[in-house]
C-alpha cells in the first residue's frame, strides 16, 4: 500500500516525508520511504516474547512534486508527470502550510486549491470518456454498459457541484469506476502544518480557527518540523521529549493509523521466540488468504488457524493461559480474520 504526500510548493512535504519515513530510497524515479504503522499491541507482544526480531506493519510513502499544482493555467490541467506519479498511489496526505501565523497563510484556501486540481483531473477523464461513449454509439458500436455510464454521470455531477467522489462513499466504491482510478475517490487526509508554538493547543480549536476541514476530510494539525525532530531521536529519548513539549502521542502516529484504516486495512499478529510480527490484510480477508500473506505454501496446505485475540493474550499473559481459559479457537477456511487476531496456522504441504 502506498500513500503520496501532495501539496503546494513549500508546504512542508519533504519535512513531513522525513518525519514519517526517516530515510528514503530511489525507485523508478520516485523517492520512496517506508513508514511503520505504530501498534502498541506489537510493542506489548515484543515485551512478552522477547523475540529476535520485531516487524511492524508498513506503508510506502512518496513525496509527489507538482510544480503545476495550484498553477494559474487551469486549461492545461495537471502536469502529466505528476498524474503518472500519483496514479498508482492508494491514498493522499495533503499538506498545507499553517506555520506562518494568522494573515500570512490560509490553509483552507490551499486545501481547496489542491482539491480543485484533483477535481479538474477527474472531470477531464469523465468528460473524455463520456464523449467517446457518445461517439461509439454514433458509429454504431455496441454501447458501454448502462451502469457504467450512470456511475460516470453521477460522479461528474458531484464534481461539478464542487464535491469529491469520495464524498459519496457508495459511488466511490462502485466496481465499474475502479478502473478509472479517480484521484478524488481515494482516501485523502489533510495535514495542517502548524508552527512549533501551536502544538500544545487543542487540535479541534486549531482546525476550526483555520476554517477547516474542507469537504469533511479527516484533518490533523501537526508540526512537521517538530515531528521530524521527534523521529530523529533515539526511541528511548522520545518519551521524555514529548513530555517536555507537552505532546501526548506524535500526531503522525495517529495520521498513519488513520491512513491504514481509511485504506480498509487491518493487522493480524504472529508471535514466537524468533519473531513478533504484524501482517497487513484487507478487512474481510479469510483465514487461508491471510495465511498466504505469510507464505504461499501455508495457504496451499492450510488446515486450520489457531486463533486467540490479542486482548485475551495480553490480559492472561501466555498462550497456555489463554488455552486453559478456553479462549483459544480453532478456525477453518471460512473464518474471517479480525484485527488483532494472534494466529498460528496449521498447514501441511
Ligand atoms: N517553522 C516551521 N517551518 C517548517 C515546518 N515544516 C517545513 N518548514 C519549512 O518550510 C520550508 C519548506 O519545507 P519543505 O519540507 O521543503 O517543503 P516542500 O513542500 O517539500 O517544498 P517543495 O518541495 O519545494 O515544494 C522549509 O524552509 C522548512 O524548513 C514546520 O513544521 N515549522
Ligand atoms: Mg520538497
Image (cartoon, rainbow, N blue to C red):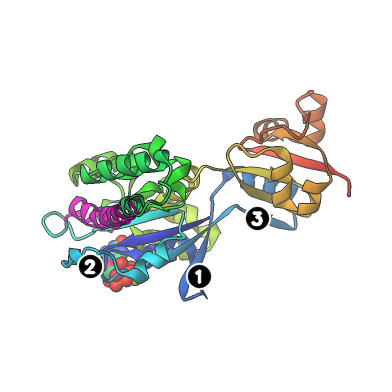
Ligand 2 located in image quadrant: bottom left
Report crowding for label 2: few under 14, some 14 to 19, many 20 or more residues within 10 A (C-alpha): few
- The residue closer to the viewer here, 106 or 285, is 285
SS of the residue under disc 2: helix
Residue denoted by label 3: 55
Q: Answer whether residue 127 is magenta in the image.
A: yes
Secondary structure found at label 3: strand
Q: In which quadrant of the rendered view does residue 15 lie?
A: bottom left
Identify the mark at residue 281; answer none if there is no mark: none
Q: Position of residue 189 (x, y in %)?
A: 36, 49
Please rate how many residues cluster around mark 1, counting C-alpha atoms within 10 Å: few if below 14, some from 14 to 19, many from 20.
Answer: few
Query: First in sequence: mark 1 or mark 2?
Result: 1
Q: Using residue 300 as the reference point, say whether residue 25 is left or right of it.
A: left
Q: Nearer the viewer, mark 2 or mark 3?
A: 2
Residue 209 in picture, x, y percent from top left: 18, 43
Residue 245 locus on image (x, y percent): 36, 53
Residue 330 visible, this orientation:
yes
Residue 278, relative to residue 20: is it above or below? above
* Dot 3 or dot 1, earlier in sequence: 1
167 to the left or right of 74: right
Which stretch did the figure color magenta? 106-132
Q: Main secondary structure of the magenta part?
A: helix
**Residue corresponding to mark 1:** 23
Spatial separation of the CA atoms under disc 1 and disc 2: 34 Å
Residue underneath mark 2: 76
Residue plotted at (34% across, 64% down) = 13
Q: Is mark 2 within 8 Å of ligand 1?
A: no
Amino acid at each position: 500500500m502506498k500513500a503520496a504526500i501532495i501539496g503546494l510548493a513549500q508546504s512542508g512535504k519533504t519535512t513531513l516525508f522525513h518525519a514519517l519515513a526517516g530515510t528514503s530510497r530511489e525507485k523508478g524515479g520516485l523517492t520512496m520511504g517506508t513508514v511503520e504503522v505504530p501498534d502498541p499491541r506489537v510493542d506489548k507482544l515484543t515485551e512478552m516474547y522477547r523475540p529476535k526480531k520485531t516487524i511492524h506493519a508498513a506503508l510506502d510513502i512518496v513525496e509527489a512534486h507538482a510544480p503545476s499544482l495550484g498553477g494559474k493555467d487551469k486549461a492545461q490541467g495537471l502536469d502529466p508527470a505528476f498524474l503518472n506519479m500519483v496514479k498508482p498511489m492508494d491514498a493522499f496526505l495533503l499538506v498545507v502550510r499553517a506555520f506562518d501565523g494568522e494573515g500570512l497563510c490560509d490553509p483552507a484556501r490551499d486545501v481547496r486549491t489542491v482539491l480543485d486540481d484533483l477535481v479538474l483531473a477527474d472531470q477531464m477523464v469523465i468528460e473524455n470518456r463520456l464523449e467517446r461513449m457518445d461517439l461509439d454509439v454514433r458509429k454504431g458500436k455496441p454501447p458501454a454498459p448502462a451502469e457504467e455510464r450512470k456511475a460516470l454521470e453521477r460522479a461528474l455531477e458531484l464534481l461539478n457541484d464542487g464535491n469529491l467522489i469520495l464524498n459519496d462513499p457508495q459511488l466511490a466504491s462502485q466496481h465499474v469506476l475502479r478502473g478509472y482510478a479517480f484521484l478524488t475517490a481515494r482516501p485523502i487526509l489533510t495535514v495542517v502544518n502548524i508552527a512549533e508554538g501551536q502544538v500544545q493547543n487543542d487540535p479541534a480549536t486549531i482546525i476550526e480557527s483555520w476554517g477547516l476541514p474542507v469537504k469533511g476530510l479527516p484533518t490533523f494539525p501537526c508540526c512537521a518540523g517538530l515531528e521530524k525532530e521527534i523521529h530523529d531521536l533515539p526511541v528511548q529519548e522520545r518519551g521524555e521529549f514529548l513530555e517536555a513539549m507537552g505532546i501526548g502521542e506524535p500526531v503522525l502516529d495517529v495520521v498513519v493509523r488513520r491512513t491504514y484504516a481509511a485504506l480498509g486495512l487491518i493487522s493480524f499478529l504472529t508471535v514466537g521466540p524468533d519473531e513478533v510480527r504484524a501482517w497487513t490484510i484487507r478487512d474481510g480477508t479469510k483465514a487461508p488468504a491471510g495465511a498466504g500473506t505469510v507464505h504461499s505454501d501455508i495457504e496451499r496446505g492450510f488446515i486450520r488457524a489457531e486463533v486467540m485475540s490479542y486482548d485475551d493474550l495480553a490480559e492472561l499473559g501466555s498462550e497456555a493461559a489463554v488455552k486453559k481459559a478456553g479462549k483459544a479457537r480453532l478456525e477453518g477456511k471460512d473464518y474471517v480474520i479480525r484485527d488483532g487476531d494472534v494466529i498460528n496456522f496449521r498447514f501441511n504441504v
